[in-house]
Amino acid sequence: MSQPEEAIASENQIPPAGQDASGGNGTGDKTDLQQALEQSDEIAEKIVRQHNHERRELPRKIVNWHATIAINTPSGETSVPILIRDVSAEDFDVECKFNLSSTKPVLVTVALPPRNPHGPPEIIQLTVSMPSAILSHDAFCFRMPFVKFHGKAREALSRFLPGGKDSMF
């Protein structure tokens, strides 16, 4: 048998008497490998804890709301369906099947989940700016900063944000 084959064969053998399968001596002492693995687990856990908290100035809430954007085209105003993926006190992140662009603010109509589970959705309107999109998978993604709230849109939206009304502006 060649040297690498001997090493593989010896790794697959039953440990000698007085040793456990992990390579320890059976007395509960930890091997260097076991200690290194535990330390790496602790380090990984610390890294995950550090990176799992929200670092943005304004926390975002993940949502799945249907909405439409009113876009002015040469042939008139057109409503384009969008999907709002998350919201903060300052903006929406949305997905759209079309690459939209507007140098002027646009009107967005949003269907918020109802207050009563069996009631109709709450419809709000607000004006947003619409910077350029980024193509991600099969949709265009936009961040749409709020420009103006219409009616009770601000209050309706605030009930979905961490901190409620106090988090809005």
Image: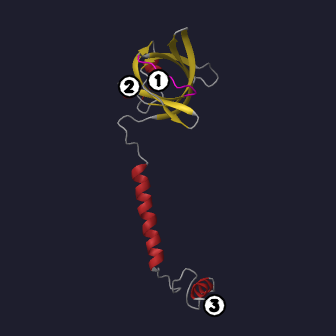
Horizontal placement of 118 versus 48: left or right? right
Q: Nearer the viewer, mark 3 or mark 2?
A: 3
Q: What residue type is labelled 3?
A: Met
Under tag 2, what secondary structure? loop
Q: Name the spot of residue 14 as percent of width and height, x first.
A: 63, 86
Q: Quadrant of the N terminus?
A: bottom right
User: How many labels, in total?
Assistant: 3
Q: Are marks 1 and 2 in contact (CB under 8 Å)?
A: yes
Farthest-out residue, front:
74
Q: Mark 2 points at which residue?
A: 168
| Dot 3 or dot 2, earlier in sequence | 3
Q: Which residue lies under the disc numbered 3?
A: 1
42 to 144, vertically: above or below: below
Q: Position of residue 24 (x, y in %)?
A: 51, 83
CB of mark 3 within 8 Å of CB of mark 2? Answer: no
Quadrant (top left, top right, bottom left, bottom right) of the C terminus: top left
Earlier in the chain: of badge 1 and badge 2, it is 1
Residue 112 appears in the picture as rendered? no
